[in-house]
Image (cartoon, helix red, strand yellow):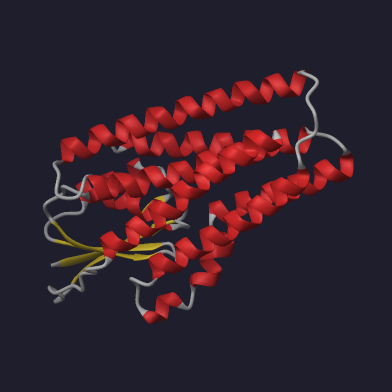
Amino acid sequence: MNKTIFEITKMDCPSEENLIRMKLDGIPSIANLDFDIPNRKLTVFHSGETVQIEKSVIELNLGGKKISTEQTDQTEFNKNANQKKLLWSVLAINFAFFIIEMTTGIISKSMGLVADSLDMLADSFVYGISLFAVGGTVIKKKRIAKLAGYFQITLAIIGFVEVLRRFFGDEKLPNFSTMIIVSIFALIANGICLYILQKSKSKEEAHMKASMIFTSNDVIINLGVITAGLLVNWLSSSKPDLIIGTIVFVLVIQGAFRILKLSK
């Protein structure tokens, strides 16, 4: 058995972990994957060469780089029997906040909230693909990934068009208080998701969940929408909301392309 360690610089929340798991699924030489999200490290236990594994990691464009490969005597690995239950929990939270943020975003005329809702939906897709493809074939998983990726891109493009329309049109100011309040709850929800997923890790990793929360893209987006809400109120302008919405839509499309890579 060999142990290969990868540095994944853009792996800062569990959704990236699931993308990597899906990408590496089906490589018969892999015996186990051990993720250290706070330190952005992936340890792959496998037999044979690392060429296919390294190629798959790099193709995800998550900043993957092989650090080392060495032999190991470890052949037994802890399997988390509650993994499926945990995935269902975070899927439910993410999808619920997709609906909440999409609804409040439309009502409050905030593109920041609408865009953040799509980011929540993107995470839901990742967890959903992991769940619904369990026990299925690699082909089935790739088909689901392709559908999810294109659907996500379509929604993001619609969002871009709406941003442009509002930028050049005469729109009312978004409700800044709704932006801030809903984003604070979304921030808490993301923290809960990370905590739930970390319950499957060792205690040594669990104490690092706070650093994960503050470095994750989802949390940064939530803070961005909160900041945009404050600027909307301070400047009496909808531009901060449109800017954060545009930034998040770009991130959503980048995530969609990562998902589409799984379908190849």
From where the camera sits, is residue 245 visible?
no
Residue 159 in picture, x, y percent from top left: 58, 27
Residue sticking out furthest to the right = 235
From this view, report whether residue 256 is shown above or below residue 30: above
Residue 11 sits in which quadrant?
bottom left
Q: Is residue 241 left or right of residue 87?
A: right
- What residue appears at the point 76 percent right and 18 percent down from the top-left corner? 168
Residue 161 in picture, x, y percent from top left: 61, 21
Q: Is residue 246 left or right of residue 37?
A: right
From where the camera sits, is residue 48 visible?
yes
Q: Quadrant of the C terminus?
A: top left
From this view, report whether residue 151 is shown above or below residue 206: above
Q: Is residue 98 left or right of residue 66?
A: right
Residue sticking out furthest to the bottom = 203
- What residue appears at the point 70 percent right and 46 percent down from the top-left corner? 179
Residue 111 in picture, x, y percent from top left: 66, 34
8 and 263: which is toward the camera: 263
Residue 143 sits in which quadrant?
top left
